[in-house]
Image (tube, rainbow, N blue to C red):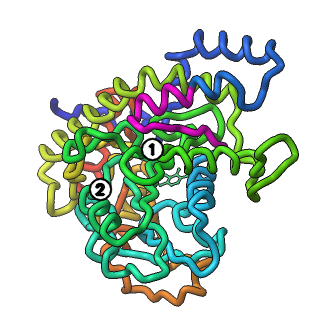
Amino acid sequence: MEATQTPTTPVPPLNLAANFQQIRAEALAELTEICDSGYYVLGPKVAAFEQSLSTYCGSKHALGVSSGTDALLVAMMALGIGRDDEVIVPTFTFFATAGCVARLGARPVFCDIDPETYNLDVAQFEAKLTARTKAVIPVHLYGQLADMPAILDVANRRGVAVIEDAAQAIGASEPRLNGRKAGALGTFGCISFYPTKNLGAIGDAGALLTDDPNLHEKATKLRLHGETTRYHHALIGGNFRIDPLQAAILTIKLKRLDQWNELRRQRAARYSELLEQTGLVPEHVRLPRDLHGTHVYHQYIIRSNRRDDLVKHLQERKIGAGIYYPVPLHLQECFAYLGHKPGEFPHAEKAAAEVLALPIYPELTDEQQNAVVDAIVGFHKR
Ligand SMILES: *Cc1c(COP(=O)(O)O)cnc(C)c1O
């Protein structure tokens, strides 16, 4: 598996159109059927998808919603989280994890990360619990599960809800919890079907998983403005609906998800093997660690202390490297009112300065991977 000398092969950060080609005929048949039916929001195709999703993830209930962000929002609304409540979140995550907490008037309480896995530091989570803490949101960043056995242990002892942000981890499973899957481990699990995610819709969509029939019922009402019967509102909800076209596409793709996740794992293993052979590891480039559960490699993350120059070098060679995420949330302008300072969460701040995502998707070819590794080698030879 030697990297070849073809540094000109372009490697796009994603190839969503190639992915669609694999389901094209089935998808277009569904599109025709849905367009002809005149039934464009919720309905039987959504119910069928929810059934397939809960079976796949191993939760009792699944609720299709408008996005992963809205899944987080509805989960917290169903738990009654609001003013004066505190919700514990890692500072190193996508914005929505904490944004949804603040939108409900609650306070995001940030924690640092474990530098090996980039996921919630469990000791800090426990240390930050107060009488006001209503929930913790572990994020399974990059497709690797947070330390759920430890998080569940603390949360159960202290009586706080666990809302998994499983937006990047659909299909990841935890052998220490009987092989249960991401999103089916906590009180609620939130999934995103944003097109770039491991299971992507052809627009925005998301889902909420839970085993609790009462929370499922409440979330179902919240999805439709809190209606109990038509035009009678027991709760203040919103429009968090999903449409049958997204549900139908997702049902088709769900059947292939395990196979696609397996290809991602193979690509990740091959990156690690090729990078090890370059002699750059660990001095110049550090590789991802696969420590908790079966990692589904939403992203393949390396670290470099010359990260910004390396990204520029790769992008100049048409290699779609990305940075997730360059600014931890405690340092975002919109959260200045929380009064955090640089240096407060050193592992997150260091990760934000050093991480770099290499292109990874099921359709990535060996030749493209070789080109990525060659370009990384080229950068360090300059
Ligand atoms: C994508 C993502 C979300 C939000 O999902 P959308 O469907 O884009 O609203 C939330 N959290 C994490 C960690 C994500 O990666």
Q: In this view, does 301 lie above or below 21?
A: below
Instruction: Name the amino acid type tagged 1.
Output: Asp
**Callout 2 amino acid:** Met
Residue 211's label in the rendered image is 1
Does any atom of ligand 1 lie closer than 8 Å to the CB of label 1?
no
The answer to the question of whether label 1 and label 2 lie on touching residues, with beta carbons closer than 8 A, is no
Residue visible at 59% across and 33% down in the picture: 201
Q: In this rendered view, identify the residue nearer to me: 287 or 11.
A: 287
For the residue pair 12 and 362, the one nearer the viewer reads as 362
Identity of the residue drawn at 29% across and 50% down: 376
Magenta-drawn segment: 49-66
Indicate the secondary structure of the residue bearing disc 2.
helix
Q: Residues within 10 Å of mark 2 (few under 14, many from 20)?
A: many
Task: Decide if residue 126 is on the left or right side of residue 313.
Answer: left
Mark 2 = which residue?
A: 148
Task: Give how far across and how far down residue 257 sits, in percent.
Answer: 41, 27
Which image quarter holds the C terminus?
bottom left
The image shows residue 254 at horizontal and vertical percentages of: 47, 25
> In the picture, residue 74 is in which quadrant?
bottom right
Q: In the rendered view of the protein, which quadrant contains the N terminus? A: top left
Q: Is residue 373 visible?
A: no
Q: Position of residue 339 (x, y in %)?
A: 53, 90
Please tell me which residue is depicted at 76% across the width and 45% down the height of the picture: 228
